[in-house]
Amino acid sequence: MKKYFKIGLDVDDILFSCNEYAVALANEEYGFDPPMTVEEVRSWGKTGERTDVLLQYYRREEFVKNQPLLPGAAEFVRELSRRAEVFFITALPPHLMGIRAARLTEEFPMVPGENIIMGFRKELMNVDMLLDDGGHNISASSSAYPVLMRRPWNRHMTGCISVNNYEEFLTFLDILMDPAAYQWEKEAGSRVIALIGPSGSGKTQLMDELIRSGSAVRAKSYTTRGKKGGEDEDAYHFVTQEEFGRLEQAGAFFETTRYAKNSYGSMLTDIRDILEQGRDAVMAVDICGGIALKRAFGKQALLAFTKRPKEELIAAVLDRECPKEEKIKRILSLDTELRNEEFCDMTVHGVRELLRQER
């Protein structure tokens, strides 16, 4: 296959364990009680919390020499190198650059040394795709397709293209390189209808209409948010943050996201149960969830982008009962979220367009 894409890979917490490794070292050195967890990490900078002690490790030579390789990283880079030209784009102090280059050359011989790029100004790197866990790097990236690797410290990011693991990133690359391979097909059987769109675009109303018409069954997600007034008890599995965390740690969810400080997650078993009954399943997800569904269900997954004029979206956000800071975040993410239309199978303005798509 021709290498149409130039792909830039961040290194820390994409290929090498960084925060988790630093947390383990900090617990050993400081004896924290209770022990620090990676879930406490909220930023790559100072926060005034006990996680600030982690920053010292990132500048130590021994730390960079001994960072563990993340499970599956070598296989991921090898597979990626078969499909595209891979570059390592890594930010670290000058005195550590030689150590990092040596580690990358040793662990990933399939990537030539001249493709190792070091520097903090990642927005200057001219690549087609960037995979990074730093929300600031994704927001500032000049690449055509900046992709966020979901980690605890970037859960506040909304609207951007994001993935949960290597497999989903490869699926997204395949969708870009050969859209027909994942395009929904009428002959594929019962569908997973994934409604994707910005806040205020009408996803929930559209989903409710499909359910009331008997055209689809809700694939219930799990959420930590409270039940809204007048909301059906069956709208979600309402759980506490602790319950959600236990399920997530156990690997129960195939996709998770965080919106307005609330967590959401979905299970493949819930969707498969509906499909096995010969029914269509419907759910509202972000583009990260859409990519995960394409990976799990292929041509059975129909990604439908719910479209609405931008001025109406802004008005809908302003009318929401949520904190001012949350409204600002949602409005600022609109342009990014509107771009996700490119990755969907179809665009809809109402339920009739979906109902016309007969199997």
Image (cartoon, helix red, strand yellow):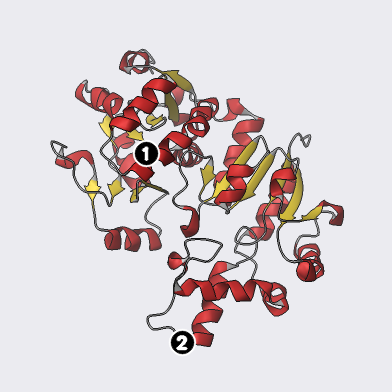
Q: Mark 2 belongs to which amino acid?
A: Gly
What is the secondary structure assignment of the residue under circle 1? helix
Figure quadrant of the N terminus: top right
Q: Which residue is mark 1?
A: 327
Figure quadrant of the C terminus: top left
Q: Residue at x 74, y 54 (%)?
A: 88
**Residues under numbered marks 1 and 2 in contact, where contact means CB atoms less than 8 Å apart:** no
Mark 2 neighbour density, 10 Å: few (under 14) some (14–19) many (20 or more)? few
Three-letter code for the amino acid on which mark 1 is drawn: Lys
Q: Which mark is residue 31?
A: 2
Return the residue nearer the eye: 212 or 231.
Answer: 231
Seen in the picture, residue 46 relative to 244 is either above or below; the reply is: below
Along the viewing direction, whichever of 238 and 106 lies nearer the viewer: 238
Residue at position x 48%, y 32% in the image: 337
Image spot of residue 352 (x, y percent): 32, 13
Residue beneath the point at 44% across and 71% down = 49
- Horizontal and vertical percent position of residue 182: 55, 30
Query: Disc 1 vs disc 2: which is toward the camera?
Result: 1
Image location of residue 279, percent across then percent down: 29, 29
Q: Secondary structure at mark 2?
A: loop
Q: Residue 203: horizontal and vertical position, in percent?
A: 33, 28
